[in-house]
Image (tube, rainbow, N blue to C red):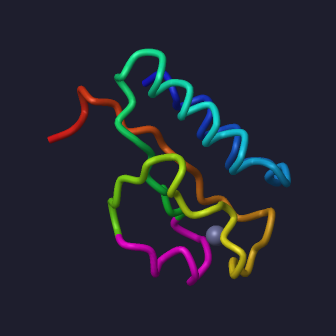
């Protein structure tokens, strides 16, 4: 899976302050360019905060509407390991 390296990368380091903006901007571009990205999901890290668990599970967001990660209420702040994953059109059920 093409995006696996991204995922691993983000789980091992503290997030940039502009992680959400940069990542969502990249997916937004991807949506425009090819139309194969339907949107993003928030992938909750197994050991992460309560805050993110309250998001609706498996909800697909448009990058413009996705919640900012890390969530303002995340107890781990920039060490939050929750990440965005793109949803590709060929993956949707
Ligand atoms: Zn978190």
Residue 88, position in %: x, y? 34, 31
Check the picture and name the quadrant holding the N terminus.
top left
- Residue 38 magenta-drawn? no
Ligand 1 found in image quarter? bottom right
Q: Is residue 49 above or below residue 4?
A: below
Please, which residue is most extreme toward the top here? 34
29 sits to left or right of 80: left
Q: Residue at x 56, y 63 (%)?
A: 67
Q: Is residue 10 above or below residue 37?
A: below
Residue range corresponding to the magenta coloring? 46-56
Q: Quadrant of the C terminus?
A: top left
Q: How many marks?
A: 0
Residue 53 versus residue 26: which sits nearer the camera? 26
In percent of the image, x 81 and y 49: which residue is there?
18
Q: Is residue 15 above or below residue 8?
A: below
Residue at 42% from the left image edge and 53% from the top image edge: 61
Left or right of 30? Residue 10 is right
- Residue 49: x and y in percent read 61, 78
Q: Which image quarter: residue 23?
A: top right
Whether residue 50 is in magenta: the answer is: yes
Q: Main secondary structure of the magenta part?
A: loop
Please tell me which residue is depicted at 72% across the width and 76% down the height of the picture.
Answer: 72
Q: Name, please, the residue furthest toward the left.
A: 93
Compare residues 74 and 7 and report the one nearer the observer: 74
Percent of width and height locating residue 54: 46, 81
């Amino acid at each position: 899976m093409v995006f696996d390296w991204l995922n691993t990368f983000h789980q091992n380091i503290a997030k940039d302050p502009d992680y959400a903006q940069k990542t969502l901007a990249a997916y937004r571009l991807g949506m425009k360019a090819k139309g194969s990205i339907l949107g993003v999901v928030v992938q909750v890290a197994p050991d992460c905060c309560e805050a993110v668990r309250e998001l609706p599970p498996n909800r697909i967001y448009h990058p413009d509407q996705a919640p900012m990660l890390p969530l303002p209420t995340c107890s781990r702040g920039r060490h939050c390991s929750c990440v965005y994953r793109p949803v590709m059109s060929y993956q949707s059920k």
